[in-house]
Image (spheres, helix red, strand yellow):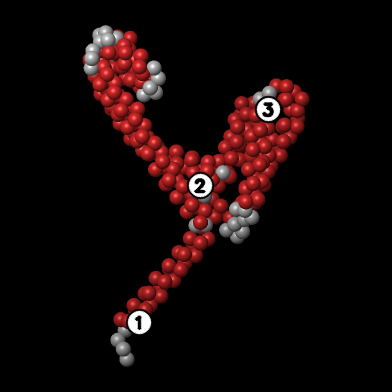
Amino acid sequence: MVDSRAFTLVMSSVIVANTLTIGLSTYPGVVERWGTALTTLEQLFLVAFVVELAVRIGAHGARPWEFFRSGWNWFDLLIVGVALLGNLGQGSTVLRIARLIRVLRIVRVLPSLRITIVALARAIPGVAGFGVTAVVIIYVYGMAAWMMFGEALPDIYGTIGKAMYSLFLTLTLDDLGATIGEAAKVTGWAIPFYVSYVVFGAFVLMNLLIGVVLNAMESARELELKADHSPPEIAERLDAVHRELATLTALLQADQRQPAE
């Protein structure tokens, strides 16, 4: 039942309604007129989330510990736990944070959002490598810009820090023509300098970053498909079959070693 489309649709509707209620509570006029109703609704939403967790745990029958094998179930448990603790707190800030955190439950019920979150996490090592590469390229070009334009344009390239900052902003390609025009007044090497920098910095590096993210998205999508089609019960049954096959193989090998009578 908990994996049915109807159950997912109901819980998604509850989460969206809870999100809208939290948003409405930011309007003083609405709070003044409907404050009691909004508070009651938020309490009902929290009860619904607790009941949902209980149903999900109960769906595992005599094996409730199977619920805790999924990282997303831990994610749900953490959010609902924080919301419950927030209700016990007295400070308005704690209550607001607890309400806001409940919105994150939308990630749990929407597979596309789950894939995005997992992809972002898996992309961190690749993005870190990309960041190191970007810093090295900007530093090299920053030193070159300081040597070529530092004296004539001290406000922009007077130090390596200023040069790297200016070149970093240039990656956005905002007002690039004016930037090249100012530098071209200093030396004719400005045009090939900026052309090569834009090619390597804005195009090559950005495409590398896109490649890293797309690769992480594909990997996350494969993990989501495996999670959907490989429930723990099936995995355990396969393990049991493998163990039985191993036992039968051992018995057959033992029989073959015995001398024929």
Mark before the other along the chain sequence, 2 or 3: 3
Labels 2 and 1 touching (C-beta < 8 A)? no
Labels 1 and 3 touching (C-beta < 8 A)? no
Q: Can residue 49 be seen in this view?
A: no
Q: Nearer the viewer, mark 1 or mark 3?
A: 3
| Badge 2 amino acid | Gly
Q: Mark 1 points at which residue?
A: 255
Q: Position of residue 256 (x, y in %)?
A: 32, 81
Q: Nearer the viewer, mark 2 or mark 3?
A: 3
Query: In the picture shown, does residue 256 fall above or below 152?
Result: below
How many other residues sit within 10 Å of disc 2, few (<14), some (14-19) or many (≥20)? Answer: few
Query: In the picture shown, does residue 130 fall above or below 58?
Result: above
Q: Residue at x 59, y 57 (%)?
A: 60
**Which quadrant would the C terminus be assigned to in this image?**
bottom left
Mark before the other along the chain sequence, 1 or 3: 3
Q: Name the residue under label 3.
A: 25
Q: Position of residue 118 (x, y in %)?
A: 47, 42
Mark-to-mark CA distance, 1 and 3: 76 Å
Looking at the rendered structure, which numbered label has been put on residue 71? 2
For the residue labelled by badge 1, is the local secondary structure a helix, a strand or a loop? helix
Mark-to-mark CA distance, 2 and 3: 31 Å
